[in-house]
Image (spheres, rainbow, N blue to C red):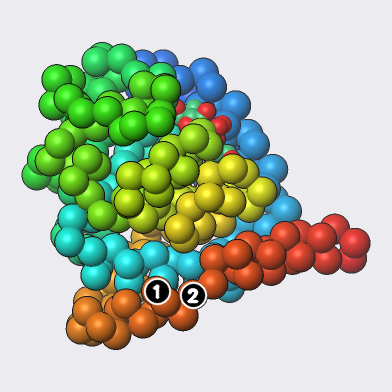
Amino acid sequence: MKTSKKHPRYESLKYRHMLVEGMKKGYVTQSGLIAHGRGEAFDYLLGEKTIPEAFTAEKAATALMLSSRNPVISVNGNTAALCPKDIVRLARTIDAKIEVNLYYRTVKRERLIEKILLKNGAGKVYGVGRKASKRIPGLHSERAKVDPEGIWSADAVLVPLEDGDRAEALAKSGKKAVSIDLNPLSRTSQTAYISIVDNVVRAIPNMTKIALELRKLNCETLRSIVEEFDNAENLEKIVGRIRTGLSE
Ligand code: PTJ
């Protein structure tokens, strides 16, 4: 379906249609559409823009990824539908690997997402089919399956649109999880090492822009940016912002 660019909700409708297309092609799940609806509701409460707290988290997260030994970006169905090119650009800018990791895992979906990422310029895509031969301990969903060369050996993992359990399991395996989730109260946001409360379509390009600046800095300076960031305090500010916005 074609939507006029003059429509006041053009952007929002465009992203909905991208997800519906992804579902028709078989790589976005029906639950992915429901998850998007929940995200939209929080985005609305946050003004559908990158709030200052989100930008601060994006900066800390970019510094973390840049100062990590083996950073990996995890990609699911929704992310592949919404911003595949931006994911590839970010991966290239911060020198990170890209791994397909799905909650509703099927080899067909993995291969379709791999194809999209390759078409958008990715050199290599991890975690597809038998390559996901390791299991993250303590995680009982299909998300546990990871690539030994990707998430398994990563020290920092960027996880857009999670389902809750993984940030905790990644932390227990000694990895630093960076979440992108519009819900500041979700289990993912509450357990991630750095929680970015922003729409993935804004957060990923923001991180690329930030990375172009930060990658000029040395590792020590990057680490001090990460250390100065207080995730719990940042999340509290975001919840406060929603509360104030509603009472106004
Ligand atoms: O592709 P798969 O099989 O890995 O499945 C992906 C989904 C998204 C279906 C799966 O991870 C899932 O069920 O997720 P949840 O538990 O519904 O959580 C998704 C979270 O992402 C919710 O807290 C939403 O608010 C948030 N969210 C939705 N859309 C966006 C978003 N956050 C950032 N940007 C969005 N565009």
- Let me know if residue 218 appears in the view: yes
> Left or right: where does residue 175 sit relative to residue 127?
right
Which class describes the residues within 10 Å of circle 1: few (<14), some (14-19), or many (20+)? many
Q: Which is more toward the observer, 205 or 124?
A: 124
Task: Give x and y (percent) for residue 231.
Answer: 54, 66
| Contact? badges 2 and 1 (CB < 8 Å) | yes
The dot on residue 70 is none
Q: Residue at x 69, y 43 (%)?
A: 41
User: Mark 1: which amino acid?
Assistant: Val
Left or right of residue 215, residue 235 in this image = right
x and y, in percent, of residue 106 in the image: 31, 15
What number is the disc on residue 226?
1
Q: Is residue 146 above or below residue 208?
A: above
Q: Amino acid at mark 2?
A: Phe
Res 80 seen here: no
List the residue tagged with mark 2: 229
Mark 2 surroundings within 10 Å by alpha-carbon count, few (fewer than 14), some (14 through 19), many (20 or more): some
Q: CA distance from mark 2 to mark 1?
A: 5 Å
Q: Picture quarter containing residue 104?
A: top left
